[in-house]
Image (cartoon, helix red, strand yellow):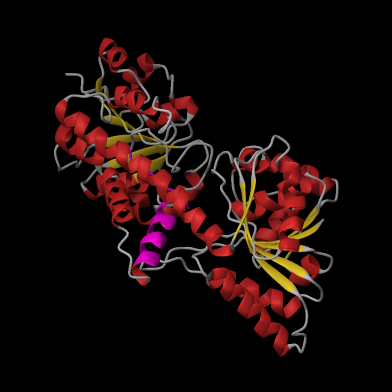
Amino acid sequence: MNICVIGTGYVGLVTGTCFAEMGNKVWCVDVDTEKIARLKSGILPIYEPGLKELVMKNVAEKRLAFSTQLEEGLKDAVVCFIAVGTPPGEDGSADVSYVLDAASNIGATMNKYLIVVNKSTVPVGTADKVKNIIKQQLTVRAQADLEFDVVSNPEFLKEGAAVADFMRPDRVVIGTDNVRTAELMKQLYEPFSRNQQPILIMDIKSAEITKYAANAMLATRISFMNEIARLCDKVGGDIANVRLGIGSDSRIGMQFLYAGSGYGGSCFPKDVKELVSTGCKNGIAMDVVSAVEAVNERQKYYLVDMVKKRFGEALNGRRFAIWGLAFKPQTDDMREAPSITIIKSLIDMGATIQAYDPEAIEQAKTVLGDYAASITYSKDMLEAIYNADALLVVTEWRQFRQPDFVEIKSKMNQPVIFDGRNQYRAEQMARLGFEYYCIGRSCYVQ
């Protein structure tokens, strides 16, 4: 098929590239001229494992192209995906203005039957708005009889594993009320479901709600475990044993049951807020989801509270090493990352920071620009710990799992580790002479 994708962020670029990899001809369109110019030069705006190689391959084989002109993308397209950002507004609701702008541009440009697909995460009812805007534009152009369909096709991509998730999805959700459109969408996705992954056809509003419900459920599991971890710290339990005990229940399972410093990223925080906002607008108190958000915000300060108990609230002259800036490993995404809260809090108490992340340093420099005078960004993980009073492990990058602790101890002012991802074993830390603090495991070593 000929496909147009509007937006070249995480979702749009991965979507367009993976469809091209399956033999489709894809145009990725974006209004950002600099971004498109860089993509044409082989420079990607994001870090995602395996994506650059696929982009370069499909560009070379002339199945993937980039443009700022929607006319170019829509010329031969049968399907047009809207994959633009929906950032949260001040009230927590999703800002769909970019989606509606894309819809308006589609209506002003299309010249034949088109399937318009909402790939962006959008509140329930957005498909109706997209349809109305396209109709209005076609009426203005005196082409009101031009046919089109609007589909909801939410993405379920994990940053750091987005390519693999797209190529081997757990399921594909397609919201449409048109049987013909459903068959065309199934045909498009069939190459990705060779191993019998289900393609679920449902009504549009159910599809729109499904994405928010899925992310809120996963966020709930994380916040639940973080709350249980706090209880473990208070009464002496071990969250690792609790995880094993409940995760072995086939009704629960092991996924998303790790305690840590809280969730971040572009999806969970935004989608939880939007679900609360949607409930409020419709007179439904989303009490569980609201509690999930509150627990997560509190959890981001948990390591900071440990630092205060150990060093006091006046941290002037103290130097802390931070391992991990991105909200999760295998990405450079700093959106809502726990590291932001932790670093700002420590600096506000007088500390200086030596930070390292394999991919997110440039993003961090932008996000933490107001705190730049108190942050040194290190070229590697060992440089970051030099003369540090403590190390805080914030993101669980693989290279942090088995470091040379003898060398680490020799470089630090004090052998103190605050492990926000429970990467290490307390017994080993005790043997090596570290003060070791972690989450929910009674880890503190005197």
Residue 49 located left or right of residue 16: left
Asked if residue 386 is positioned above or below residue 186 in the image, the reply reads: above
Q: Is residue 262 magenta?
A: yes
Query: x, y (%) of residue 108?
Result: 72, 80
Q: Residue at x 65, y 59 (%)?
A: 35
Q: Position of residue 72 (x, y in %)?
A: 80, 68
Please state which of residues 430 and 297 is positioned toward the viewer in this rendering. 297
Q: Residue at x 15, y 43 (%)?
A: 314
Reply yes or no: does residue 324 show up in magenta: no
Q: Left of 128 or right of it: where is 316? A: left
Q: Which residues are magenta?
A: 261-279
The spot of residue 310 in percent (x, y) is 16, 32
Main secondary structure type of the part rendered in magenta: helix
Identity of the residue furthest to the top in this view: 431
Viewed as shown, does residue 307 lie left or right of 113? left
Residue drawn at 22 percent across, 46 percent down? 350
> Residue 141, can we see it?
yes
Is the residue 364 above or below the residue 241 in the image? Answer: below
Question: In percent of the image, x 31 and y 49: which residue is there?
Answer: 292
